[in-house]
């Protein structure tokens, strides 16, 4: 079975940093698309950042550009999200996602795509006060 296990969430003051990790298992981690999404209470789930696991090419939502960095460790089948200069509006449940297919060029991985051809992690809470 495919498993995506997130860790690293927590509570932090505004301006602080957190690093989320997503360890993938049971999954062919090669030339696929992995991403981080978040969902705040009462809001829809939105894509935050994605990485093409083959090329390492990244894409970010405008709201996090310059503050968040997505990266990977292929040897560990793990994707990271380094979050700096955190703001209260970054408070949300953060989900790791993986699609079985390569990332689309120049765009975020979509929720609907993950629902059909991908996998979701269980989520990790990030609270910024």
Image: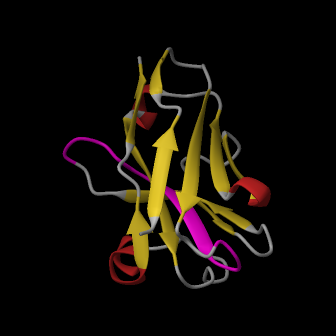
- State whether residue 93 is above or below residue 107: above
Q: Pick whichever, 54 or 74, lies toward us.
A: 74
Using the rendered view, name the quadrant where residue 62 is placed: bottom right
Q: Pick whichever, 78 or 17, lies toward us.
A: 78
- Residue 108 image point, x, y percent: 54, 70
Question: Which quadrant does the C terminus fall into?
Answer: top left
Q: Residue 33 in magenta?
A: yes
Question: Which quadrant does the N terminus fall into?
Answer: bottom left
**Residue 62 appears in view:** no
Q: Is residue 22 left or right of residue 43?
A: right
Q: Pick whichever, 9 or 23, lies toward us.
A: 23
Q: Give the range drawn in magenta.
A: 29-42
Q: Residue 122 in magenta?
A: no
Using the rendered view, name the quadrant where residue 44 is placed: bottom left
Residue drawn at (61%, 76%) of the image = 28
Residue drawn at (78%, 58%) of the image = 75
- Residue 43 image point, x, y percent: 25, 50
Q: In this view, does 124 lie to the left or right of 59?
A: left
Residue drawn at (59%, 19%) of the image = 15
- Residue 70 image point, x, y percent: 68, 51
**Residue 102 appears in view:** yes
Q: Pick whichever, 110 or 95, lies toward us.
A: 95
- State whether residue 91 is above or below residue 97: above
Q: Is residue 49 left or right of residue 115?
A: right
Residue drawn at (60%, 73%) of the image = 33
């Amino acid at each position: 079975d495919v498993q995506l296990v997130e860790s690293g969430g927590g509570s932090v003051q505004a301006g602080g940093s957190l690093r989320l990790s997503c360890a993938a298992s049971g999954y062919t981690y090669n030339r696929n698309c992995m991403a981080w999404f978040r969902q705040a209470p009462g809001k829809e789930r939105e894509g935050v950042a994605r990485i093409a696991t083959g090329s390492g090419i990244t894409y970010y939502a405008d709201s996090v550009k310059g503050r968040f960095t997505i990266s990977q460790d292929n040897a560990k089948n793990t994707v990271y999200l380094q979050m700096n200069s955190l703001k209260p509006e970054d408070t949300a449940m953060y989900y790791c996602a993986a699609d079985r297919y390569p990332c689309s060029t120049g765009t975020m991985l979509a929720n609907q795509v993950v629902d059909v051809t991908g996998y979701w992690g269980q989520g990790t809470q990030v609270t910024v006060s």
